[in-house]
């Protein structure tokens, strides 16, 4: 094969001449060490290559060899529960092979284990006509994920050979008679990461994704197939929010891309997830998790690729008919990687030095999420929910990455450092966050739970907004100046904030709240409000209500700690609230109900 | 907007105010007084004269209307003489407003 020659090395960017036979986005082996790189720019015969490994020690004159193939991921059984780096090298195998805790350069490892034997169950038989996207058989990959083997792109025809049995990834599992002859197929297929996998039709994402986080599910819900951004300054709890969603969301599979953040955050995932039990399946969370790690000390170019690797894997499982969630923590690091490459390419910088195409790249990524109808003759539905953390420097969300992200996402969870300092976690600011799925989710919840959920949510939000208005007055002239009605609003808002919005991610019970419990808790607080207002109307004083319900409010605060099995206990407290309020009215001047 | 004036207290003390044309409400128990004041407050009464003896029994109610514009609750002595609560309140309010006891 013809080889090019390196003429310039600048960090992860290598330029090589006499590369006229290569094409853009081709994967290359760079230098004598055969580092993996990708062509990102071509000028005449000079190719600019971003190298996915550390380039120190590479010199000019060394050869560059193109593979003629785009950067692709391998898709097949063995992918679940793995931890990959940005270009899909399994880090476990990597460590065993190189006997090093750090990335050793020039190592070529196949992404999926070629030796492992999988039990393949054929679902199609000889003579069946198949089109791309059809499922020919299944492999029970982990306890909860059934890996559905799909006919890859470009293969259409009649099956001439297929049998259940034990196979490795190297074995031919089935053969298809196509127009261009018989094609033998393995369980594995490849897909270029920068290209979205095809689907038949995009559907409106209107089914909520339960995350078990009260503030998210109630006030700023996300749907299966939705897109969300979590911007927040340093220390506000982005990573915890992402981890919580990865742990408890009711999806079938989670792809977690740790992109340019600290290594110990991935360690947390590796330590915690295997021990945690998925509330939906009862199995370990690792059984449904795929990790892509490109921590801050790993090569910067691979960071750029890690996001695409993640979403391509997510798309593959979506095509099987699964609901997949992909978390990217953090897209700011990814954008910074883009900026670094762009700077080295000497492109004209845009806002804050980010490349001018930052917006389109971000949009490209988020647009690959969504709820879809898959290709193939059986119509399956699958979804990808994309949740990206953004780390705006100094918490200033007017910077380009946040702004470009906000243009494409429909849910905005604004984390607030001042709330975090007050130890209000999750520190989602309820005044600045928003979700454009609120109406859809409200309708869905009204129908499925048969309660007036959307009005309850709207009413609670009004109270919280009213509180912030009143808070301004209180700061100027003191709480005493408020009318009793307004002071009651402040009390209810406090209940909502402290007993509903705040949630302890590190408490065994409080870490996850089911839909039913969320309804009961919110209902309890709102009942307290209605009853208190009614008592006031009947002549009870604000102070009397407050003094009389001290113990009761304590109980409301402790509803968080009621386990999911005993949620109906909340109804007892609700009855207690009613009784207590009647008693207060009776004890006050008014002896009879008006 | 015009406001009405009411007098609340034990019957013996408040009846004479009827001559002046005030609305008079006699109440014998604190519960009854509280109820009366609450309903008067909702009924466009701008000034409520309350006997000191009764006021002593319902401090919560007095405190509640301290923060409101209407009604102004003014304490008056009853037929047995003054308990000085009313005058103290005036002095307190003056002190609050001026910052110094100028009376």
Image (tube, coloured by chain):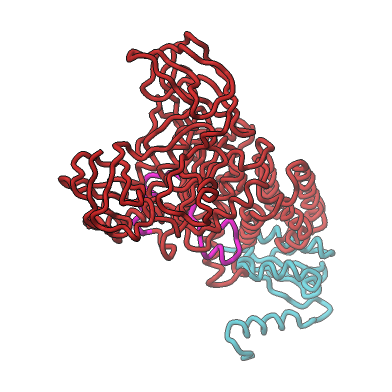
Q: Quadrant of the N terminus of chain A?
A: top left
Compared across the picture, whether A509 is left or right of A214 comes to: right
Tell me the red chain: A
Give percent across and percent down for residue B42.
65, 58
Compared across the picture, whether B6 is left or right of A311 comes to: right
Q: State the residue at coordinates (50%, 48%).
A: A94
Say above or below: A359 vs A296.
above
Tell me if residue A96 can be seen.
yes
Q: State the residue at coordinates (81%, 74%).
A: B53
User: Could you tell me how many numbered marks the image carries?
Assistant: 0
Give percent across and percent down for residue A279.
67, 40
Residue lying at the far top of the rendered structure: A127
Q: State the residue at coordinates (44%, 15%).
A: A130
Seen from the viewer's position, the closer of residues A486 and A411 is A411
Query: What is the quadrant of residue A360 in the picture?
Result: top left
Q: Is A166 in the magenta?
A: no
Q: Is A414 in the magenta?
A: yes
Say above or below: A28 vs B3.
above
Tell me if residue A436 can be seen.
no
Compared across the picture, whether A114 is left or right of A41 comes to: right
Seen from the viewer's position, the closer of residues B79 and A73 is A73
Compared across the picture, whether A424 is left or right of A33 comes to: right
> Magenta residues?
A398-427
Q: State the residue at coordinates (48%, 13%).
A: A161
Say above or below: A247 vs B79.
above
Tell me the cyan chain: B
Give percent across and percent down for residue A151.
44, 22
Give percent across and percent down for residue A188.
47, 29
Seen from the viewer's position, the closer of residues A61 and B71 is A61
């Amino acid at each position: 094969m013809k080889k090019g020659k390196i003429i310039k090395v600048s960090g992860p960017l290598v330029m090589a001449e006499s590369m006229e036979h290569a094409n853009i986005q081709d994967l290359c082996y760079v230098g004598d060490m055969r580092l993996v790189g990708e062509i990102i720019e071509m000028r005449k015969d000079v190719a600019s290559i971003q190298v996915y490994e550390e380039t120190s020690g590479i010199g000019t004159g060394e050869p560059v060899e193109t593979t003629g193939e785009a950067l692709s991921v391998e898709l097949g059984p063995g992918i679940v529960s793995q931890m990959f780096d940005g270009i899909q090298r399994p880090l476990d195998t990597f460590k065993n092979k190189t006997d090093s805790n750090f990335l050793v350069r020039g190592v070529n490892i196949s992404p999926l284990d070629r030796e492992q034997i999988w039990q393949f169950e054929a679902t199609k038989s000889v003579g069946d006509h198949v089109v791309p996207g059809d499922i020919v058989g299944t492999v029970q990959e982990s306890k909860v994920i059934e890996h559905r083997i799909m006919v890859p792109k470009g293969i259409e025809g009649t099956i001439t050979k297929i049998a259940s049995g034990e196979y490795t990834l190297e074995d031919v599992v089935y053969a298809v008679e196509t127009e261009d002859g018989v094609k033998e197929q393995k369980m594995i297929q490849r897909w270029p990461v920068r290209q979205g996998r095809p689907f038949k039709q995009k559907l409106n994402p209107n089914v909520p994704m339960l995350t078990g986080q009260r503030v998210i599910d109630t006030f700023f819900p996300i749907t299966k197939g939705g897109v969300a951004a979590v911007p927040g300054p340093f220390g506000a709890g982005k990573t915890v929010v992402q981890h919580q969603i990865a742990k408890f969301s009711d999806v079938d599979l989670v792809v977690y891309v740790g992109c340019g953040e600290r290594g110990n955050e991935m360690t947390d995932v590796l330590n915690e997830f295997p021990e945690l039990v998925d509330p939906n399946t009862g199995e370990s969370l690792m059984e449904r998790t795929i990790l892509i790690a490109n921590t801050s000390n790993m090569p910067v170019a691979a960071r750029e690729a890690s996001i695409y690797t993640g979403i391509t894997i997510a798309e593959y499982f979506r095509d099987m008919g699964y609901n997949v969630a992909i978390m990217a923590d953090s897209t700011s690091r990814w954008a910074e990687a883009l900026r670094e490459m762009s700077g080295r390419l000497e492109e004209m910088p845009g806002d804050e030095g980010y490349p001018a195409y930052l917006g389109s790249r971000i949009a490209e990524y988020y647009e690959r999420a969504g709820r879809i109808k898959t290709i193939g003759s059986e119509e399956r539905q699958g979804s990808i929910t994309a949740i990206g953390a953004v780390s705006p420097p100094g918490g200033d969300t007017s910077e380009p990455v946040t702004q470009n992200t906000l243009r494409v996402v429909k849910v905005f969870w604004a984390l607030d450092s001042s709330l975090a300092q007050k130890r209000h976690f999750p520190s989602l600011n309820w005044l600045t966050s928003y979700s454009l799925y609120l109406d859809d989710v409200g309708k869905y919840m009204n129908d499925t739970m048969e309660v007036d959920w959307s009005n309850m949510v709207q009413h609670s939000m009004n109270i919280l907004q009213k509180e912030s208005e009143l808070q301004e007055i209180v700061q100027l002239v003191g709480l005493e100046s408020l009318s009793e009605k307004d002071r009651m609003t402040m009390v209810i808002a406090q209940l909502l904030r402290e007993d509903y919005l705040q949630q302890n991610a590190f408490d065994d019970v409080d870490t996850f709240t089911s839909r039913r419990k969320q309804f009961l808790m919110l209902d309890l607080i709102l009942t307290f409000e209605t009853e208190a207002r009614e008592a006031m109307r009947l002549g009870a004083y604000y102070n009397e209500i407050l003094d009389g319900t001290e113990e009761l409010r304590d109980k409301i605060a402790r509803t968080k700690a009621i386990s999911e099995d005993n949620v109906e206990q909340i109804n007892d407290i609700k009855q207690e609230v009613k009784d207590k309020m009647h008693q207060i009215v009776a004890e006050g001047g008014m002896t009879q109900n008006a | 907007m015009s406001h009405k004036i009411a007098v609340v207290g034990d019957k013996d003390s408040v009846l004479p105010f009827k001559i002046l044309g005030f609305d008079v409400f006699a109440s014998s128990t604190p519960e009854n007084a509280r109820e009366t004041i609450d309903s008067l407050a909702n009924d466009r009464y701008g000034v409520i004269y309350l006997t000191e003896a009764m006021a002593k029994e319902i401090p919560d109610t007095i405190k509640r209307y301290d923060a409101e514009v209407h009604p102004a609750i003014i304490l008056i002595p009853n037929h047995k003489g003054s308990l000085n609560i009313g005058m103290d309140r005036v002095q307190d309010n003056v002190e609050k407003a001026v910052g110094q006891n100028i009376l």
